[in-house]
Amino acid sequence: MLALIWARGLLLRRWPRLAAAAVGVAAAVALLGSLGSFVSSSKATMTRRAIADVAVDWQVDARPGTDPVGFLDDVARHPGVRAALPVGFATTTGFAATTATGASGASVGASAGSDSTTQTTGPGQLLGLPDGYRSTFPDELRDLAGASSGTLIFQQTAANLHVGPGDTIEVTLPGGASARLTVDGVVDLPQADSLFQDVGAAPGGQPSAPPDNVVLLPAARWHQLVDTVAVAVPGSVKTQVHARVDHSLPADPAAAFSVESGRARNLEVALAGAGAVGDNLGAQLDRARDDALYAQVLFVFLGLPGAVLAGLLTAQVASVGRDRRRREQAVLRTRGASTRTLLALAGVEAALVSVAGAAFGLGAAAIIGRLSFGTAGFGATTGSAVGWGAVAAVTGAVIATATTLVPAWHDARSTTVAAGRTSPLRPRSPRWQRYGLDLILLAGAATVFWLTSRSGYKLVLAPEGVPQISVSYWAFAGPALLWSGAGLAAWRLSELVLGRGRRLLTVLVRPLAGPLASTVAATLSRQRRTLARALVLTALTGSFAASTAVFNATYRQQAEIDARLTNGGDVTVTEAPGVTPPADTAARLGDLHGVRTVEPVQHRFAYVGTDLQDIYGVRPGTIAARTSLQDGYFQGGTADQLMQRLSSTRDGVLVSAETVKDFQLLPGDQLTLRLQNARTKQLVPVMFHYLGIVKEFPTAPKDSFLVANDTYVAESTGDSATGLFLLDTSGVAPPTVARAARQVVGTSATVTDVTSSRKIVGSSLTAVDLAGLTRVELGFALALAAAATGLVLALGLAERRRSFAIISALGAGRRQLASFVWAEAATTALGGLAAGAVTGWALSEMLVKVLTGVFVPAPSHLAVPWVYLGTVVATAAVAIAAAATLAARGARRPAIRTLRDL
Amino acid sequence: MAAPAPTAPAPTGPAPTAPLVEAVGLARTYGSGRSSVVAVHGATFSLAEGQRVGLTGPSGSGKSTLLHLIAGLEIPTGGTITWPCLAGAPLRPGPVAVVFQAPSLLDPLDVVENVALPLILAGVGTSEAREAALAALDRLDLDRLADRLPGELSGGQAQRVAVARALAGRPRLLLADEPTGQLDHVSGTTVVDALLEVAGRTGCGLVISTHDPAVAERLPEGWVMVDGRLDGSTGREPGQARSCSP
């Protein structure tokens, strides 16, 4: 009964306090719930992305001697299989082509006749593709030049043999048989790694790289060539069934992997040893589920400070009313209330706050999830949705309990009735200050940062460039320790300045308080604990907003750079192998509407020892500016510095770190490469001087490559042909410019644009669109900034209405009263924002550094979203001004009425 | 409710030298309509420098409201009140000082800062105000408490500090609203002693509202409030005194 009366009283007379605390709890619950929505939608994105990345879901290898027709039938009829086609694989002993001099390219082995040269390759693969393969598995092959059917040659093989559409090649099969084939088209094999996988081999037993020499034939022609060989040399020919399976999988990558790999295992069992399944879809989902786990940790980590802040905000709101609660408790105790009764009544308040906060928070999270991520659920599965919702609600209850019930319990146990009627103004330093917890946390942050940075975790690249993320979870401890340590340090510092620096404070508040400065300073000084709490809350909110905004902006910046790095320019024109574009191509592209600059780049191949690497001939004077080269692409200098070095050293070359290590190079060392002479087709040694390390370059592969002066490359090879044109589109939509460029270069070149590249670069994690999360996090940060400044100040000032009424009763004028209010507001705002700016900057630096793994490439500088940060400061300023104005107006109320009401 | 005719209390005792406050038909009503409460009703009186009045009456009779009206803390809803000898400057901080019933010291300021505050609000320099505050504390034998915070004082000490604060500005009219209401007998006696001693020494007007007969008896004049009416009171008829002391 007493509890009901108390609850009624609270709802009727203390509702502002309850509402403010419930808003804090709701903010924490809503943020956690929104994170759940985001994680659930991003997991679904990862699953979709993983599925979309797979060209052939299953490659089912038939064991030798298996009836191909029956085997195909078994696979095709297996539940979940939507399409199945047989693909023949035959090993060749080599390919050869004789071409007239004048064609471009590089060769593995070449012999020169009077007017022609013959190029040969080592062993390769001859594939037989059935009718309908291209339409069933459209992503397995990509047309580069010529026809899309008939005899197709892999682009690297075409480059090795210096052939293009219409040329003739000779294939030699095991046993000595050979055949002449006319090339109909040149293709790329984007999924070569999985296409040539050794099905059934242990993960570490896969070949390190797919074959360089591949020719693809229609199935009928392939059978004509290899059927006899299959009998003569059985191990040289095999049949695989490529299958497309049902893609209606659970949204969660882990659940999708479980379902999908189960189906693949089921097929293997059904085949009873007749075949093994190369589960490309399962492998992709397996990677995605690892990424999803990491994403969950990462995004929760990024969002968690917001929930903690909401908790601190609630605690601050609750602490503002603590004096009054103490007095109420003292009254109850004098009337005989036991500790149990007091706790029960505090529990009523906590319960009201919990229930209201959880209800509003979950409702807000559902709305935010629906608007930002397209889902009102908090998880990818029912279990995780309920789990996220429950965790969010329980967190709200914990916050309400910790901020209401625990202080009440503490007061009931340790405070006397008399003490409860007054508020302590000479409190002892808290234990954490006496033990230096803030300094310990900061030292811990520095140590963890040093240790994790030293270990140099970053993107780990698979041999053929499949990016996988490997980041130490331990690294998360650094920013967490820094944030909490900086908050406590700001508290210590503000108490120190407010407590010991009263003279300084007097000087600082004089512009606001005039003759009252020393009195106002004394007031601020004695209320330093309350002010410090508000100041720290402002600082933590500011740092959360700043670090989140900077991290997200840097993430966006790097995603943009990644897309540009992959694509080369806003629009990139890549000539097909063997094609020499007209000399005026650059000029014609430059005349297109929307094209600001055209940067031509030579693309050749060069041997570094026995290793064949891409070499790019560039114009160092212009490429840095026209392609936004980042400092992070290079080592040992900035982009400008290295381009200047290249410009001043005609035979200079930038090489990969791996090459530097392999050849023990020092700057200035001579490096001999072998490049193909355009006229003779012979590989000729060319002297270069090593200038520095290049890690990334527009359009370059993820592994080793070289960058040199285009004039020197042209002179050394007798070929000035340009293979790449990087277009800067000055704000015009790249796809529009790309369409126009295609009209100029025709079908001989591939035209790509950065907008499309954004959709295909990166891992499944970096493919996650952070825009929704960014909006939610930054929105919460903004709301928390307003609450941490305006609401806390308003509540603090409201709690001191009695003091203002007394001052008013003593005869203070409006301006004098306002000076107390504004001095407090200015102290909290300026101190908090300054501490927040410093902490936010340090936290941003650390976050970006320790989370380098999610940036591709690593950022050379932070992206600072000044507009957003300005908005945060403006919001805080407006909230503070509003709170102070309201308080100052409230202080003008007749003093006696206020004193009577209180 | 129609206001009754203003009362004109008959003068008794030695005539004060100058009128500080004159009220005619003074009224204060809270709220409106049926729920309105008449706190003071048709009070007519004058107060002069040197006059010492005990204002008694049961709880809720309007004593505090009348004091607040005299102090200028409340705006009357009927009648008039003037401060003939205090015109030209704000009443507070300045010639009128109030000692409240409830604790009225500011928690974040120590004793001397609390006492100095009205002086600083009145434009007195910080150092000068501090010296005056220390002097006021010294007069009440409270100088040893100068550095204490209100939370570190007993109820009696806090109220005596409030008296010191009221006196620090050398008021010409001192109003004490049940200053002993929340104190034990000994503490209450000390506070009243302090008020009387200071009033006697400075010659300021003094009104103490109380429902403690022992306190009222210590004052030469007695005004009684009953249901908002000033009844059987002593004082000077408005308009009788014409010269203000400097």
Image (tube, rainbow, N blue to C red):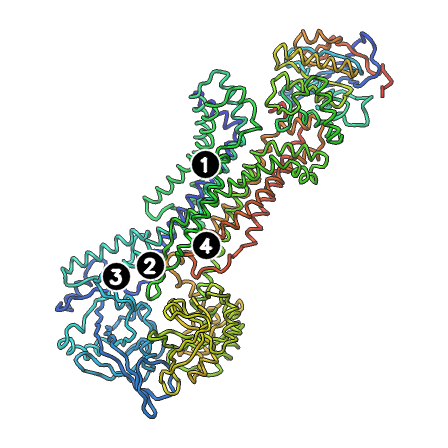
- Does A81 sit above or below residue A186? above
Q: The residue tagged with tag 1: helix, strand or loop?
A: helix
Q: The residue tagged with tag 3: helix, strand or loop?
A: helix
Location of residue A764 (image quadrant) = bottom left
Q: Residue A645: horizontal and vertical position, in percent?
A: 51, 72
**First in residue order: circle 1 vs circle 2:** 2
The residue type indicated by label 4 comes to: Lys
Viewer-nearest of discs 1 and 2: 2
Question: Badge 4 is on which residue?
Answer: A849
How far apart in space, not on screen, are marks 1 and 2 (Cα)? 38 Å
Question: Badge 1 is on which residue?
Answer: A357
| Crowding near the residue tagged with mark 2, few <14, some 14–19, many ≥20 C-alpha atoms within 10 Å | many
How far apart in space, not on screen, are marks 1 and 3 (Cα)? 52 Å
Instruction: Name the chain under label 1.
Output: A
Viewer-nearest of discs 2 and 4: 4
**First in residue order: circle 1 vs circle 3:** 3
Q: Is residue A738 visible?
A: no
- Does A345 sit above or below residue A305? above
Question: Badge 2 is on which residue?
Answer: A50
On the rendered structure, is A803 left or right of A573? Answer: right
The residue type indicated by label 3 comes to: Gly
The residue type indicated by label 1 comes to: Gly
Viewer-nearest of discs 3 and 2: 3
Say whether mark 2 and mark 3 are on the same chain: yes
Question: Which one is in front, A89 or A8?
Answer: A89
Say whether mark 2 and mark 1 are on the same chain: yes
Outermost residue, bottom direction?
A: A114
